[in-house]
Image (cartoon, rainbow, N blue to C red):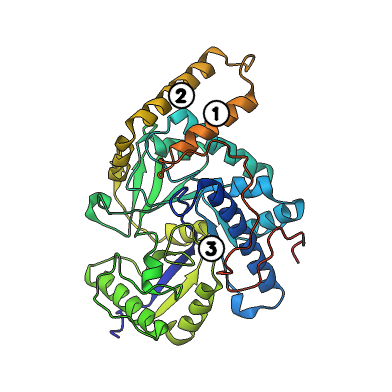
Amino acid sequence: MKKPSKKWTIYVIHHSHTDIGYTDAQEEMEFHHVQFIRQVLDILRQGDQGRKEWSGFKWNCESAWCVERFLEAAAPQEKECFFKYVKEGRIGVSGSYLNLTELVSGRVLGQNLQKIKKIMGENGVQIRSAMTADINGYSWGFSDALLDAGVENLLCCLHTHHGYHPTFQKQNPFWWTAPSGRKLLVWNGEHYLLGNELGLAQESEFQYTIQDGMPEMQDRFHKAELRLYSYVKTMEEQNYPYDFVPVTVSGMMTDNSPPSVKVIRFLHEFNEKHRAEIQLKMVTLQEFFDEAKGRLGDIPTYSGDWTDWWADGVGSTPNIVAHYREASRLYDMVCALDPDCKIVTQEEREAISYNLIFYAEHTWGLFFLHHGAVAPQRELSGLAQGPVCPKSQRACP
């Protein structure tokens, strides 16, 4: 392994990519993501109670939708535990509602972001950072919607299957000037499963974005060592200006993946051997931006849309999309003609707004007609690698 020319810090952001309807039915996705947060609470709780090998574990809720669904299903003790860990900086909450196509209107996007802002604010939490994954870009108004909701920073984990990174660069920060003239700090990152290919979860053997021809190895730890050293060495050769970089990782090499303590175990083992040259640090999204913000120097400023080539598939369902667009226009008319909710109640409007943003999610092809449906109660596969306590009524230590 070639030694890097300087000491590196890799900020590890552990998350589950929210892709509704892709790996399972939408009702099942809601159930899974609620259970993932419950697994995280159990991991953190057991770490506090003496599981030293789990110390330092942190989790990031990639979409605020997951948090909203969890809080709706959670018992009071679970909610208390969740917000305790959020305030302690051990669970991060993203200020983006879902990974969206550009079907969503500014009104609907703003309403749902403000709803999450209100829920979190009532519990003493301010969301200042957001992340998205698997989409290539955004309409220009997305920046103002985030800023209006109090979001100052955006991590983009783009999927480059159809397009590529803005300015043809990755792992680079810049200011995104919104239509209002305000600025959003953007970190234009890597693919959202890069950490899995690098070996941080010890659960991946196939190549996707990394094309190094490295054969399968029985010793996964050694393969991860080789890839991590190769990654930072490549960054140096490409004149990357910093000594730190963010990398996102899921429990498994798949979307909608549960948390895994294998990640934190790997970090401890790797740091024990290599921290003098490369240190892996598990962080929340906000923690990454807090540590990075003062070290960026002079970075460029851009404005305008990011063309989202991934959403071209919306054109493959023209009849349903036309129906959706008509519903969106009718909703705008309702809001304009009935501003005091005398005909259409506030509760009905919230249900309409939820359905409109839910269909605009980047797996738009399936529509969740009844989001209150209860998914079958069944145990997950145990991929958290530790005792899982669904619907735990225990308070935090």
- Which is more toward the observer, 226 or 66? 66
Counting residues from the start of the chain, the first of labels 3 and 1 encountered is 3
Q: Which residue is at a point 53% across and 51% down the rendered structure image?
A: 29
Q: Amino acid at mark 2?
A: Ala
To which residue does mark 2 refer?
A: 327
Residue 352: image tag:
1
Disc 1 and disc 2 in contact, CB within 8 angstroms? yes
Q: Which residue is at a point 22% across and 72% down the rendered structure image?
A: 237
Which x, y percent locates residue 296? Answer: 37, 58
Residue 258: image tag:
3
Counting residues from the start of the chain, the first of labels 3 and 2 encountered is 3
Q: Secondary structure at mark 1?
A: helix
Q: Amino acid at mark 1?
A: Ile
Q: Which residue is at a point 53% across and 58% down the rendered structure image?
A: 60
Q: Is residue 332 visible?
A: yes
**The C terminus lies in which quarter of the figure?**
bottom right
Instruction: Determine crowd level at label 2: few under 14, some 14-19, many 20+ residues with C-alpha closer than 10 A.
Output: some
Which x, y percent locates residue 394? Answer: 77, 62
Instruction: Determine crowd level at label 1: few under 14, some 14-19, many 20+ residues with C-alpha closer than 10 A.
Output: some
Q: Secondary structure at mark 2?
A: helix
Q: Is residue 276 visible?
A: no
Q: Secondary structure at mark 3?
A: loop
Q: Amino acid at mark 3?
A: Pro
Residue 19, placed above or below residue 216: above
Counting residues from the start of the chain, the first of labels 1 and 2 encountered is 2
Q: Which residue lies most toward the top here? A: 337
